[in-house]
Image (tube, rainbow, N blue to C red):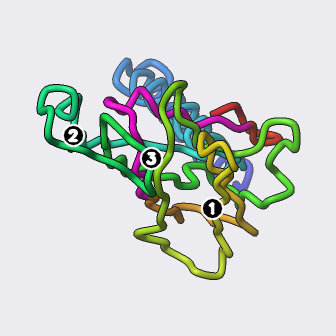
Amino acid sequence: MIFYAFESIMGNVNQKVEWLADNPWIAILSLLLAFAGIILAVIIYIKSRKTKSVCYAIRNYNLIRNFVSKIPLLKLSWDEEKIENVSISKVALWNGGSDVVENTDIASLDPLTISVLSPFKILDKNIIYLKNSKNKLELILNEERTKIGVKFEFIDRHEGVIIQVIHTGKRKEDLKITGTIKGGCKL
């Protein structure tokens, strides 16, 4: 008797399994769930991957462009040096990766640098916004006034700085950001 009850239950289960296997909507739903699982696995892998990346953007405001040569009586100088152009560039640097970028992550042969193309000069530099003062960010202008070294202790994820650079260039392309992040990429 127990055997017949068990056989009856198994017969019902077999019928339901066959119905599920033969139903095209169940097959389509299973396929869609499999694709969704693969896509979700790829997204989770990409999101969990640790990356080191310093990103930047430059916005340039040209204040004076060759006006000195067009107006004979006008003399423009910076610290007693005659200049023809004045631009203010805002350089935003931030950690666009998912891991902390530390000062030891910057390649010593290719440090993080803001430079101006020849024959232009950097007149002044200033930090106008810093998300985290514990980063110990500092700017070091070389004697030739062509490069600003950017030094920091660390930059956490989504932290950054906005640097104001006053220079004699005319366009944002006259400024160049260089550097190599170990385990990351060149800027």
In the picture of the structure, the residue carrying the numbered disc 3 is 81
- Where does the image place residue 84, in percent across and percent down from the top left? 31, 34
Task: Please name the amino acid that badge 3 sits on.
Answer: Glu
* Residue 55 in sight here: yes
Q: Residues within 10 Å of mark 2 (few under 14, many from 20)?
A: some
Q: Which mark is residue 85?
A: none
Q: Earlier in the sequence, mark 3 or mark 1?
A: 3
Q: Secondary structure at mark 3?
A: strand
Task: Kindly check if marks 3 and 2 are in contact, taking CB atoms under 8 A apart as contact.
Answer: no
Residue 172 part of the magenta segment: yes
Kindly identify the residue that appears in the image at 52 percent across and 62 percent down.
160
- Where does the image place residue 109, in percent across and percent down from the top left? 87, 37
Q: Earlier in the sequence, mark 2 or mark 1?
A: 2
Residue 168 part of the magenta segment: yes
Task: Please name the amino acid that badge 1 sits on.
Answer: Leu
Q: Is residue 167 left or right of residue 4?
A: left
Q: Which mark is residue 139?
A: 1
Kindly identify the residue that appears in the image at 62 percent across and 49 percent down.
148
Query: Of the residues tagged 2 and 1, which is closer to the observer?
Result: 2
- State the quadrant of the C terminus: top right
> In this picture, is 85 found above or below 173?
below
Residue 177: name its quadrant: top right
Q: CA distance from mark 3 to mark 2?
A: 15 Å
> In this picture, is 3 found above or below 130?
above
The front one of 111 and 21 is 111
> In this picture, is 101 found above or below 23?
below
Tell me the magenta residue range: 164-179
Task: Please name the amino acid that badge 2 sits on.
Answer: Ile
Kindly identify the residue that appears in the image at 40 percent across and 22 percent down.
28
In the picture of the structure, the residue carrying the numbered disc 2 is 64
Q: Is residue 134 left or right of residue 26?
A: right
Task: Kindly check if marks 3 and 1 are in contact, taking CB atoms under 8 A apart as contact.
Answer: no
